[in-house]
Image: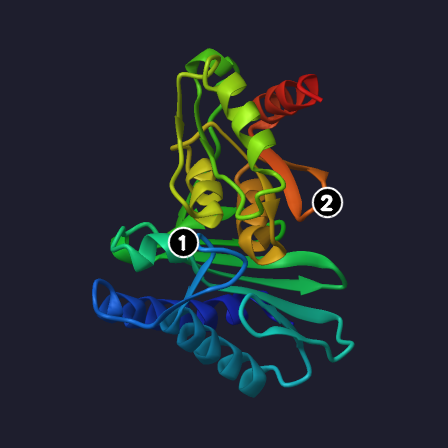
Amino acid sequence: MDLKKVMAELEELIRDIGKYQLTRFNQEIKIETKLNSSDLVTEVDKISEEKITDYIREKYPTHSILAEESGKIDKGADYRWIIDPLDGTNNYAHGFSIFTISIALEYKGQTVLGAVYYPKQDELFTAIRGEGAYLNGNRIRVTDREDLSQALLATGFPYSLIDMDYSLKLFNNIVKKAQGIRRTGSAAFDLCNLARGSFDGFWELGLSLWDIAAGKLIVEEAGGRVIIFSRENGFSLVAGNKIIAGVLLREIKSLG
């Protein structure tokens, strides 16, 4: 499979989905809840996902798909697409402009291609395994900062109330040791901004595969490290350059 050709075609699709999302942004839309009142899905999520999955079914009819809203289409294929059509739905529903589209492609269980698009700023992050990470065609790298006290970090809080108290405990510990912490509401956005060097580190508990599949590859191809330290109640991870990722993991493990 020619991954460069796949990426070139995917870039056109993902930008078109972003344009659609911007036309509906700050407009009246239908909103529903899933796990709880904080876990939202909008008609824009569903329509965006349908546009993406329709494209994949037509272009790659033998491939499997894992998508946030529609679930699994398992064809027993070596290739599987992993889709988050609108990461940051809560932001989108409230008119806050940090939201992304995240699409990854796996081959035999390994992510080989990732694309994350931030429509509001027309920022497209891409990576093909072994070929580096890019923002709008320009190579990006993680920072080389090693001291947590000089690091700007990003994090998020889980929808599951099971992990909320522990997440707050981690935040209260780490916020005292870092230069600053930001909470944007989109894990894909956070991972990509780590890859470009805007953040030095990231951690979050209880994420889904579609939240992280593309962003994880982009971080790794930008010279960073992503450590999944638990798969209980979702994927819990730390990310950063090789030093900061290790420091964050030690801080988390020190709290039990």
Q: Is residue 13 left or right of residue 167?
A: left
Where does the N terminus fall, quadrant-wise? Answer: bottom right
| Amino acid type, label 2 | Arg
Give residue 94's quadrant in the image. Answer: bottom left
User: Which numbered disc covers residue 157?
Assistant: none
Separation of disc 1 and disc 2 at Cα?
22 Å
Q: Identify which residue is drawn at 68% across, 47% down.
A: 233
Q: Residue 238: x percent and y percent?
A: 60, 33
Give residue 62's quadrant in the image. Answer: bottom right
Asked whether 161 or 95 is in front, the reply is 161
The mark that comes first in sequence, 1 or 2, is 1
| Amino acid type, label 1 | Gly
Q: Residue 235: x percent and y percent?
A: 66, 46
- Specify how the rendered protein is coloured: rainbow
Q: Is residue 133 above or below residue 165?
A: below
Q: Is residue 136 visible?
A: no
Residue picked out by circle 1: 88
Q: Is residue 138 above or below residue 16?
A: above
Q: Identify which residue is drawn at 50% across, 13% down.
A: 147
Per the image, label 1 sits on a secondary structure element best described as loop
Q: Residue 27: x percent and y percent?
A: 21, 68
Per the image, label 2 sits on a secondary structure element best described as loop
Asked whether 222 or 100 is in front, the reply is 100
Q: Residue 112: x percent and y percent?
A: 64, 58
Q: Is residue 116 visible?
A: yes
In the rendered structure, are the residues bearing label 1 and label 2 in contact, judged by CB atoms less than 8 Å apart? no
Q: Identify which residue is drawn at 41% across, 77% down.
A: 47
Asked whether 2 or 152 is in front, the reply is 152
Residue picked out by circle 2: 231
- Determine crowd level at label 2: few under 14, some 14-19, many 20+ residues with C-alpha closer than 10 A: few
